[in-house]
Image: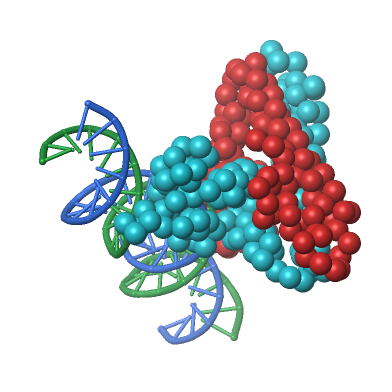
Chain colours: A red, B cyan, C blue, D green
Amino acid sequence: MDTLGIGALARRAGVRVDTVRYYERSGLLAPKMRLQSGYRRYGAAELARLRFIRRAQTLGFSLKEIRDLLALSKGRDVARVKRAAQGKLADVEQRIAALQRVRDGLAMLIEACPGHGDPTDCPILKALGGEEPQLLGAA
Amino acid sequence: MDTLGIGALARRAGVRVDTVRYYERSGLLAPKMRLQSGYRRYGAAELARLRFIRRAQTLGFSLKEIRDLLALSKGRDVARVKRAAQGKLADVEQRIAALQRVRDGLAMLIEACPGHGDPTDCPILKALGGEEPQLLGAA
DNA sequence: CTACGCCCTGGAGCAAGGTCCAGAGTCAAG
DNA sequence: CTTGACTCTGGACCTTGCTCCAGGGCGTAG
C-alpha cells in the first residue's frame, strides 16, 4: 500500500494522532478511505492538506478560516474563489501594515534608548507607562 | 471628578465592563482608586493603558505578553528593558516576514487566475487542493 | 498462539480570553 | 424618598484548539 495509517500521517506532518482526529471532527481533513476494521487510510493529498493546515495556522489563520479556504476548492465558481482569495489578501495586507507600525515604533524607541542610566530617560518606559502609549500607533 | 467609573471607562475603550474586571483579575489594569463603596475609579492613564492593551491584542500579542511588556515600565533596569524590546522587535519582524510570504503567494495565485472558465484552470484551486499546496510557502 | 504496537470511539480535561448571571449595595435625578 | 441606572462579588459557562484517558479491537512477527 502507498497509503498511510493515522500514526504515520501524523508523524510526517509533525502533529499528534489526536490532532488529526480532531481536524476530522472539525471538518478539515477526511481520510481517503477506511478499512473494514474502521482504520483510517490517508494518501499524499491528505498529507499535503494537513501540512497546509499547519502552515496556515502558524500564520494566524483560525481553523474556521482555513476551513473556508479549503472549502473553496470544492466550489465550481471560479469567480467566487478569486474574490475570496482577494479578500484574504486584503486581510493579510492589513495585518502586515499594522505589524509594520509596531515594528517602526519599537525600532524608534530602541534607538532612542541609551540602554543605561536613569529610567526616567528611557523612551521605552515612557511610551509604555505614560499618558500616550504610542508604541502601537495612534487609534 | 475627572475620574471614570468602570462603565464609562469600558465604553470609551470599546470593551465590556466584565472585560475590564477580567483584566484586573489578570493583573493587567488596576483602578486608580476605589470609593468607600468599593466602586472602581479610573483616570486618563488607565484609559490609555486599556487602549494599549486592546491594540496590542489585535496585533496578536497574548495577554501574558502584554503583561510582560507593561511590567517593564516598573523595572529600574534600563538595559533589561531595552533587551526585552529588542526581543519583541525580532519577534514582530519574523511575523511580518511570514505574512509577506503568504501575501506574495496569494498575490501570485490571484494574478494567475483568469476569474472565469474551467475550475481545473484555476491556480488557486490547484494550490489549495493539489499535491503541493505552495500557497503558504514551502516548509 | 502470544505479544506488542497500532488503531477505534466517546468523553473528560485544559488554557486562554472572555461573557453572563444572581443577589445585593450605591448614586443621582426628580 | 423613590426610581432606574450602575456597581459590587463570586462563580458558572462558552469557544477554540487541542490533549489525554479508558476500554476495547486489529495485525504481524516470532
Report if residue A38 is visible in the image: no
Is residue A109 positioned above or below C2 on the image? above
Q: Quarter of the image holding residue C10?
A: bottom left
B6 or C27, nearer to the observer: C27
Q: Quarter of the image holding residue C25?
A: bottom left
Residue A116, percent from left and from top? 86, 68
Q: Residue at image x 82%, y 44%?
A: A104
Is residue A60 positioned above or below B82 on the image? above
Residue A79, percent from left and from top? 65, 16
C26 or B126, nearer to the observer: C26
Residue A131, percent from left and from top? 66, 47
Is residue B17 positioned above or below A120 on the image? above
Report if residue B108 is visible in the image: yes
A113 or D22, nearer to the observer: A113
Residue B21, percent from left and from top? 43, 54
Q: Residue at image x 57%, y 56%?
A: B63
Is residue D10 positioned above or below A99 on the image? below
Q: Residue at image x 44%, y 51%?
A: B41
Q: Is residue B44 left or right of residue D5?
A: right
